[in-house]
Image: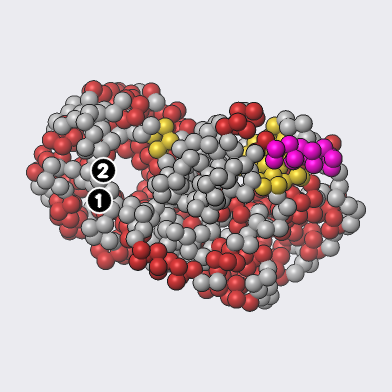
Amino acid sequence: MMNLAVLTVLIVQQGPEAALARKCDSQIPWIADGTELVDMELAAGHHPQYPDARVPKNYTVDRSSLLAKARATAAERKRLILWYCPRMPGLHMYRALLTDRYMKSAVFTDPGVVDLVTAKFVPLRMCCDEATGGALGLKAFDFVEPGLVVLTPEGKVLHKIDRIRTFNADWFRAALVAVLRAHPEFNRPAGETVDDLLRGGDDDKAFEKASPDQKALILRRRAKFEDVLKLGCAPTQKGIALLGLKRFDEARKLLALERSPETLYYLAAADLWTGKDPAPRLRTLVEKHPDSPWAWRAASNLARADDSLPEGPLAHHLEDFFLRPPEGLPTSTRAPAKDADGAARAALDFLLRAQWEDGSWRDARYAYWPDPKILPNVWGAVTALSALALLEWRELAPGRVDAAVKRADAFLRDDARLAPGQNEECYAQSFRLHYFAKRKDVPSLNRIVARMAALQDKDGHWAHEYANPFSTAVGVHALATARKAGADVPEVLFRKAADALLAKRGERGRQPYRVEDATADSEKNSMSRSALCDLALYECGKASLADVALAVESFWKFVERLEAVRLCDYHSDGRLAGFFYFHATFHTLEAVRALEPAARGDSLGRFRDRMLAIPEWDGSFIDSHEIGKSYGTAMALLILSRTR
């Protein structure tokens, strides 16, 4: 938990934005259960689910009655029920408050979504409990929050959209319109005027009689940005279309002609996606237009959460402005890629846009354990991985990559960017070793090796928060990579680490989660670290390639269990958690690459296929939303590169 001094600073930082941010999602007339989610739900000592210090201890919710009320209203009005579920029962999420805030800000405060939901649905906002989930066939892992469930007045589930990790209001509006079109008996026009038709999502009927600006809005919502530029519409419409086309300089010029709340918000977005701080424009919007929903969205991206970072999705690169409309009836924001080259191009473009002007990638908000002082190390680790990924895919965009790597290189050479002695430093240093090994920069490697030696404890472990086998193995693999690149790595570092990893090793490379655990975990619970740890032992000269191969088999044996929790943010299935997904996949791939070609089997293709199945529609990759898209995208690019 944060100390008192940090909390005091946060209170001072809040300012008027916090109150304004609370207005997000205040225009949709939800039938609601009144549940207030809590950040750090489990670690804060809160549980069972849906606790909040502001809710009396005897607070109970009859969710069956709320659903019955929604059904009765839907029957009376001949509408579908749109149930927004921000939280499922279970221990699989501990920061669901964050994704709920993202939905409130980016989606449920958008005028188009507000109009459509109000005009065509009975809106129900309600957490799912075990009884409701059982009755409707919803359960954790099958349905990952936040999510939308569309029901008939009889309570039949017609459609579900869950695992939402890319937030774009026009995408959600299009998805809901697709649901309505699939069930025309619930899709009567909201009126006859163009405004009424637009409000109800009847864009095709509205287009013929629409004004140029209204046509531009319809086309924008379909991502037909080039067509908008051909219309005689207002500069604002063309400016937003240019932003959608990633023609940032042209977009700024047109958007700056009108200082409306909407254009100020889009100008802030243009700043963000070109590496600049969006806060100055967001503050101007909040100060000049506090009554506008656009200002409420801006405020959500200025107000500071308990982790010291902006509450909203914008600064964390989770709110997208480069729409790719959903195909058919989408069930998530995932959009599988057809081939590795296409996936890599889209991911590379995302990563290049997500870099800040100082050269870093810092959308991760893993800011606890024990407090936000660890953030420089988290961002340093992600920056090293991102720069390495760019180097491995340089051929796709040489000019852009070279400019981005130049900025990142300066950042990574500056030791002052890190937080020495704070948690996660071993990861920042290990991933810097991988980057500088790629550059064959021996002086930098030797300097970081010395720091890694200082971080190793007397028993041979490295600790990210606490001493453990997986951080130790990551350190060993990074040092081995540095040694291959010419670094001078003292043999004692490998010897001590090997002794530490062998101390409690079980068969097939099974390892405990923490040093203080008495014995190794089960094969399933250890699958995300077994291959990595046996690879490290092999690199120390204390294991065979046959040992590594057996540990790799354990990964494939339980990989679907890991995939099931990929988008969860806690230890969701025993010791398996979303934040281990890319950590495990990348390092297990490294273990496979150490094997002789004949012993690899079809593993390289299987790793590639798994990556092609999971990109978001914006080109990014993600496991835990807390660690963020830049991390997941960099890891996926490295995996795709190393399976070529």
**Left or right, residue 562 beside residue 72:** left
Q: Is residue 551 magenta?
A: no
Residue plotted at (32% across, 38% down):
587
| Residue 381: percent from left, percent from top | 33, 53
Q: Residue furthest front?
A: 58
Residue plotted at (32% across, 63% down):
411
Q: Is residue 338 visible?
A: no
**Left or right, residue 187 beside residue 242:** right
Residue plotted at (79% across, 46% down):
120
Q: Which residue is mark 2?
A: 471
Residue plotted at (78% across, 35% down):
153
- Is 560 placed above or below 219 here? above
Q: Is residue 69 magenta?
A: yes
| Residue 440: percent from left, percent from top | 23, 53
Q: Secondary structure at mark 2?
A: helix
- Per the rendering, the mark at residue 426 is 1
| Residue 282: percent from left, percent from top | 56, 70
Depth check, front residue: 515 or 44? 44
Residue segment shown in magenta? 65-80
Depth check, front residue: 56 or 272? 56
Check if mark 2's residue and mark 1's residue have beta carbons within 8 Å: yes
What is the CA distance from the residue labelled 2 to the residue labelled 1? 8 Å
